[in-house]
Image: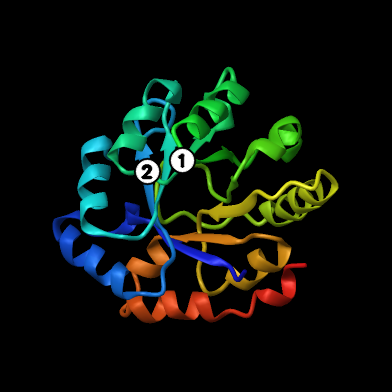
Amino acid sequence: MSHLVAPSLLSADFAQLNSTIELLDKSDADWVHLDVMDGHFVPNFTFGMMIVKAINSLTQKPLDVHLMIAQPERYIEQFRQAGADIITVHYEACTHVHRIVQQIKDTGAKAGVALNPATPVVMLEDILEMLDVVLIMSVNPGFGGQKFIYHTIPKIRKLRQMLEVHNAHALIEVDGGIGLQNAEEVLRAGARILVAGSSIFGSSDPLHTIAQMKQIDSQRYFV
């Protein structure tokens, strides 16, 4: 399996939502990444279930829904019903993370847990085998267009080693400041899913940028 590219709509023009989704459907993108923010867990507010549902009606690509919200357990079922294929919650927002991961899996969605830059990967050691995705935040969550935090590279390597030790099969996803300038380094460290927003939608040719990200030869990094 090669790596996946998941364009983040956080950086797209929502006034052109239909055409943006049409563009992504024509692209080499694998997933559509949707950042849900509540203005409480993170200092920004984006959109909720109705927008997820609308996007789901426009595309056949899997929806990778990243919940940057407090008490996510209150809304798991609603986001699944809205069309989320992958639901990722933040470790820092969950008092009972094991229970919430099981709640996600019970809906039939793939389950992910995200870690902020200052949260060590060892915090997930006891639930690694339950997870489909571990999302490493390479910026502090809340806003698009931030610069990549390079101390997340050794963090990705450490997580990859943990997965191997536990014979766990979660995919490592990385979100924040990802572009052509650092994508290969992130993949080399062990990532399998690249989330990119500004570098795609801020480029003069998003289709070409996505294609370039997909064309990186990542197979040699995966054993």
Disc 1 residue type? Ala
Percent position of residue 40, x then y:
38, 25
Secondary element at image label 2:
loop
At label 1, counting other C-alpha atoms closer than 10 Å, the crowd grade (few under 14, some 14-19, many 20 or more) is many
| Residue in the picture at 50% in, 26% down | 103
Identify whether 130 is placed above or below 6: above
Say left or right for 131 vs 48. right
Percent position of residue 184, x then y:
63, 72
Identify whether 201 is placed above or below 122: below
Whichever of labels 1 and 2 marks the residue nearer the N terminus, that label is 2
Percent position of residue 96, x then y:
59, 18
3D distance between C-alphas at marks 1 and 2: 7 Å
Disc on res. 179: none
Disc on res. 84: 2
At label 2, counting other C-alpha atoms closer than 10 Å, the crowd grade (few under 14, some 14-19, many 20 or more) is many
Q: Residue furthest left?
A: 15
Percent position of residue 84, x then y:
37, 43
Front residue of this view, candidates 141 and 160: 160
Disc 2 residue type? Ala
Question: Pointers 1 and 2 in contact (CB under 8 A)?
Answer: yes
Corner quadrant of residue 71: top left
Say left or right for 126 vs 183. right
Secondary element at image label 1:
loop
Quarter the C terminus occupies: bottom right
| Residue in the picture at 46% in, 54% down | 146
**Residue 39 visible from this viewpoint:** no
Quarter the N terminus occupies: bottom right
Residue position marked by numbered label 1 in the rendering = 109
**Residue 99 visible from this viewpoint:** yes
Front residue of this view, candidates 109 and 43: 109
